[in-house]
């Protein structure tokens, strides 16, 4: 492709994205294609000769786009948001154009130093302990794996890297913890049986007394407790584990405390939400995702550690071809995680923070929290519905309840969800809480307004009447 063709289609693609931002609401939120439909429209083998960009762009619009579920739709209420923003997209364009490999300070000095800066900005915005230091990982799953590996090394005196894992190390988390914890446990070599799940209270938050009991019993049985994973904003209901109480238990028993705040952590930029971090001084590591609720394109996960030396000691390795004369003076972030190669993720995050400012970001989050409280109020006021969990952030868990048996309520709510999503007008997801089928309405898309939330509620009421 020559420069002029690149310039032409670059302008056209930016125009298309700008139009998409404005027109995304016209698409069905969830793709309507059937399994295999997209692939059936594409050739089974690669082209032998170059194809014009005009044809490729046409196929993108006609074949690929119909198979896209529109996470940036203002009526996206499923799972959690995976937000972007114009500033973030522009940052991504420059990142892709530069094409830098940011594994060492020497390979791109500005990338390393900007990452230090924006992570320090985030630390200030959240109010994390001053001694914590940040690094960007791709996802919270990867960051949590880093924490589990660091906890393993600390618990074994950093001998696992040399001798392998020989001790019966135990990790603790609540029964509501994210599935990535179990996956990380298996990858890190602890073994699935050494993940001990702790009961939760009626708000679905971990019970500290049960954690203390489990740790003591495991010690008596000759096991070695190594790590606790606390959650601020669980995946199913955004429950908040009591960080202060859990942290004191960890300090008492010498356990690594990792805090997973993947979605809800962004809320800590609000002064009125700082309560969620009471006890943060006990944390050994902390992760949240700007790519969920801070309007930064996927992927961008902010991981903070109290002891960077433990992190580096876990991951560093020094092949001759990666050594530079500046290693003693700079941070080489390839030693701060699993990846050797690293993208310039800090650039888009820098664009977002500068473009919105802290107050602009706070205003967006406050509005999402307000809309969640508004929707929760409608649920409370309607005798046919009930809230199924507290609403500390912007997720509302609810269900239809006509007074029937639990099994029939589960089936009815499943049908209700399917009928709502089948319209293509909104998209919701579900979970189970206390063994009961629950609908989830997650608010956090950048362009969602009160109108969209009201339309979702009206659609829910309409589909409920049709089912009855």
Image (cartoon, rainbow, N blue to C red):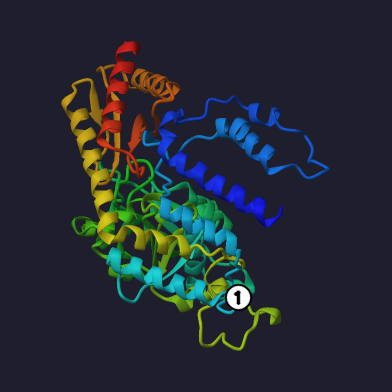
Check the image and report above or below for 70 versus 314.
Answer: above
Check the image and report above or below for 348 versus 13.
Answer: below
Viewer-side residue, 108 vs 24: 24
Q: Secondary structure at mark 1?
A: loop
Residue 42, horizontal then vertical, whole percent: 71, 32
Q: Is residue 143 left or right of residue 433?
A: right
Q: Quadrant of residue 259?
A: bottom left
Q: Mark 1 — residue? A: 107
Residue 429, horizontal then vertical, whole percent: 41, 33
Residue 151, horizontal then vertical, whole percent: 47, 68
Q: Is residue 323 left or right of residue 376?
A: right
Q: Is residue 140 left or right of residue 98?
A: left
Check the image and report above or below for 247 versus 426.
Answer: below
Viewer-side residue, 432 vs 54: 54
Residue 402, horizontal then vertical, whole percent: 26, 17
**From this viewpoint, is residue 256 visible?**
yes
* Residue at image location 25% in from the left, 18% down from the top: 403
Viewer-side residue, 331 vs 57: 57
Check the image and report above or below for 410 versus 171.
Answer: above
The residue most toward the left is 381
Q: Is residue 262 left or right of residue 158?
A: left
* Residue at image location 63% in from the left, 73% down from the top: 163
């Amino acid at each position: 492709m020559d420069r002029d063709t690149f310039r032409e289609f670059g302008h056209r693609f930016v125009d298309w994205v700008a139009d998409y931002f404005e027109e995304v609401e016209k698409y069905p939120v969830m793709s309507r294609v059937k399994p295999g439909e997209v692939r059936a429209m594409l050739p089974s083998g690669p082209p032998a000769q170059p194809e014009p960009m005009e044809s490729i762009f046409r196929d993108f619009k006609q074949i690929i786009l119909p198979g896209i579920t529109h996470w940036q739709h203002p009526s996206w209420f499923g799972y959690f948001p995976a937000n972007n923003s114009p500033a973030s997209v522009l940052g991504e364009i420059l990142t892709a154009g530069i094409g830098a490999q940011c594994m060492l300070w020497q390979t791109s000095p500005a990338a390393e130093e900007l990452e230090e800066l924006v992570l320090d900005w985030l630390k200030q915005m959240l109010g994390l302990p001053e001694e914590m230091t940040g690094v960007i990982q791709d996802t919270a799953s990867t960051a949590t794996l880093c924490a589990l590996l660091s906890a393993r090394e600390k618990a074994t005196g950093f001998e696992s890297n040399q001798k392998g894992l020989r001790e019966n190390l135990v990790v603790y988390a609540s029964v509501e913890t994210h599935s990535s914890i179990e996956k990380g446990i298996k990858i890190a070599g602890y073994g699935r049986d050494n993940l001990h799940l702790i009961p939760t209270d009626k708000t679905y938050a971990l019970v500290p007394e049960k954690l203390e009991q489990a740790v003591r019993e495991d010690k008596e049985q000759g096991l070695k407790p190594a790590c606790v994973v606390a959650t601020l904003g669980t995946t199913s209901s955004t429950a908040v584990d009591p960080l202060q109480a859990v942290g004191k238990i960890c300090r008492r028993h010498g356990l690594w405390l990792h805090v997973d705040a993947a979605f809800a952590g962004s809320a800590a930029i609000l002064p009125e939400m700082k309560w969620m971090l009471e006890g943060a001084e006990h944390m050994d590591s902390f992760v949240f995702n700007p790519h969920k609720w801070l309007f930064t394109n996927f992927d961008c996960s902010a991981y903070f550690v109290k002891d960077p030396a433990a992190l580096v000691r876990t991951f560093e390795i020094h092949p001759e071809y990666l050594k530079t004369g500046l290693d003693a003076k700079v941070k080489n972030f390839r030693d701060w995680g699993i990846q050797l190669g690293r993208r310039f993720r800090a650039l888009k995050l820098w664009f977002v923070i500068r473009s919105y400012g802290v107050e602009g970001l706070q205003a967006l989050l406050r509005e999402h929290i307000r809309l969640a409280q508004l929707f929760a109020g409608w649920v409370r006021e309607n005798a046919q519905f009930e809230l199924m969990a507290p609403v500390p952030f912007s997720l509302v868990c609810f269900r239809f309840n006509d007074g029937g048996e639990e099994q029939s309520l589960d089936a009815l709510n499943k049908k209700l969800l399917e009928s709502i999503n089948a319209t293509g007008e909104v998209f919701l997801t579900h979970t189970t809480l206390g063994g009961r089928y629950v609908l989830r309405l997650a608010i956090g898309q950048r362009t969602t307004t009160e109108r969209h939330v009201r339309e979702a509620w009206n659609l829910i009421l309409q589909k409920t009447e049709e089912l009855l």
